[in-house]
Amino acid sequence: MGTDEPGGTIPAGPPNDRGLSSPSSPKRDGTTRWPRTRGAIRLRPRERSGSPARRWVRGALLLADTGAILLAMTAAGSWSAAAWAYGGAALISLGVSGAYQPRICLQALPELPRLVGRLAVPALLLMPLGLIGLEQGIFLQVPLVVAALCAARTLAYAGVRIGRRTGHLKEPTLIVGAGTVAVELARLMKQHPEYGLEPIGFVDSPSEHGRLPLPHLGSIRQLEVILRKFDVHRVVVAFGRVREADWVSVMRTAVVNGVEIHVVPRFFDIGMASTGTGTDQIWGIPLCRVRRSVLHSAAWRTKRALDLACAGLLLLLSAPVLALIALAVRCSSPGPILYRQRRIGQHGREFDLIKFRSMRTHHDGAASWEATEAHQTAVGRWLRRTSLDELPQLWNVVRGDMSLVGPRPERPQFVARFTTDIPGYGDRHRLPVGLTGWAQIHGLRGDETSLTERVRFDNRYIEGWSPWLDIVTLLRTVGAVVRMALKPLRSDGKGQRRLARPLLPGRPLELTGYNSGKPPGRRHQEITS
């Protein structure tokens, strides 16, 4: 029966009665808590993102912008369909570009260039109507909207600052670090209430902190507990005694839990702080905002909608091909048409991955890593070569077990081992697993590639996800699958022929010596060294 990624030798568990190592395997009831390395992310995002104060500010800014656009339409004397279309498009442009993510330091004039840019896109879309004489009022409406929005934002920001000073719009803020910069930030937050930040304490590694102006709430390992106990929605990272290796898990834990996280950049006092929409400041100390988790973005819901639409359409169009493949598998050898295997998906949930059977029934696909020609049926060799054995996984996508693009899923016993041994491996399960992935299109598959590098690419995909990145991945997948289908079979040196590694699922599981007594492959040496 068929097996899937990653290929190569796996980390071994305790020796069995024959003196051979075997992988450890957790229970399959779906309730197993997978082992976590120190600092691994906890995947329990909140149902609602953002503090109540932040939601009030977003609502106030949206109301102010809507009023400004209506005022500009009145001043221009234009109530045509084009004018309404521009007003709606302007609000959408502001929302998509992050104009309703409340900043700490609220200033209208420094935001004016970005405001003009956000309003320019819908204006360019409607400008042809004015050029051909259908809507001349659009030329007057655009500058009036810019002026009105700038004035409305100035008044709205003044109102927000008043609300913050009076304590109605304050956010509990956690400071990670307990050094000089962290203590100074706590003092400035207290001294300038217009920033709307109420510092509640410090989180840092255990040490002699001396006299701190606020309580030391715990170590970095207790971050999630502290976030939920104090209902914290904003974290400022000021660097303290926390090890560099722990920073990634700190930020991922906070972002996944719906927390806005700001980082004081290194060497900010010599001009090395970045600039742009993701920057802020607290009385001269620059802050860089960490990109929000895609789990809490509207674009992520678009990804699920596209998955449903594309997977459903592909299933419908490929129905005749699926029927022919099913008939061929049935006639090729005794056994079932479909092969089901337990895999680990988003948040550690187990599901049954479905594929066409490409291996003989005596082959143990659950634990074996061999995928030589001797184990494959004649039809199976062709299916694996063209990746057509993966087509049933479109049903996994429709069911919500998988996405079209995401980190490739792995079997439970291997996830348990890799989560313990590979830094960042558990973080791959923040998002749904995929039919193809960012690591796979870069050739990271099979026993000749590093699992650490795959994990790096998977987490990079998650951190930088966008709808366009999914489109790029799918397009490159199609080209790579065609190239792999045309690639000749290669020999393993013993007269057995092995499949050239197809891209789509990031496999096959090649002969690596784990079950044959050969020296361990590159990945096993990497993990155990």
Image: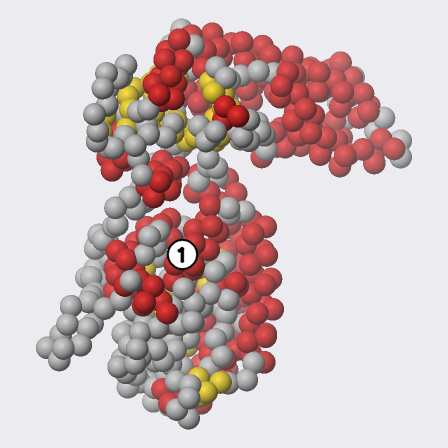
Q: Going 28% across and 21% down the picture, which residue do you hit?
A: 201
The quadrant where residue 418 appears: bottom left
Residue 527 makes an appearance in the image: yes
When the figure is inspected, residue 225 is found, relative to residue 438, above or below; the finding is above
When the figure is inspected, residue 286 is found, relative to residue 381, above or below; the finding is above
Image quarter in which the N terminus is found? bottom left
Q: Going 27% across and 35% down the picture, which residue do you hit?
A: 220
* Mark 1 neighbour class, 10 Å CA radius: few under 14, some 14 to 19, many 20 or more: many
Q: Mark 1 points at which residue?
A: 455
- From the viewer's perspective, tell me whether residue 238 is left or right of residue 134: left
- From the viewer's perspective, tell me whether residue 185 is left or right of residue 204: right
Q: Residue placed farthest to the bottom in the image?
A: 495
When the figure is inspected, residue 459 is found, relative to residue 69, above or below; the finding is below
Q: Look at label 1 and name its amino acid.
A: Val
- From the viewer's perspective, tell me whether residue 351 is left or right of residue 24: right
- From the viewer's perspective, tell me whether residue 201 is left or right of residue 139: left
The quadrant where residue 72 appears: top right
Of residues 174 and 504, the one drawn nearer to the viewer in this rendering: 174
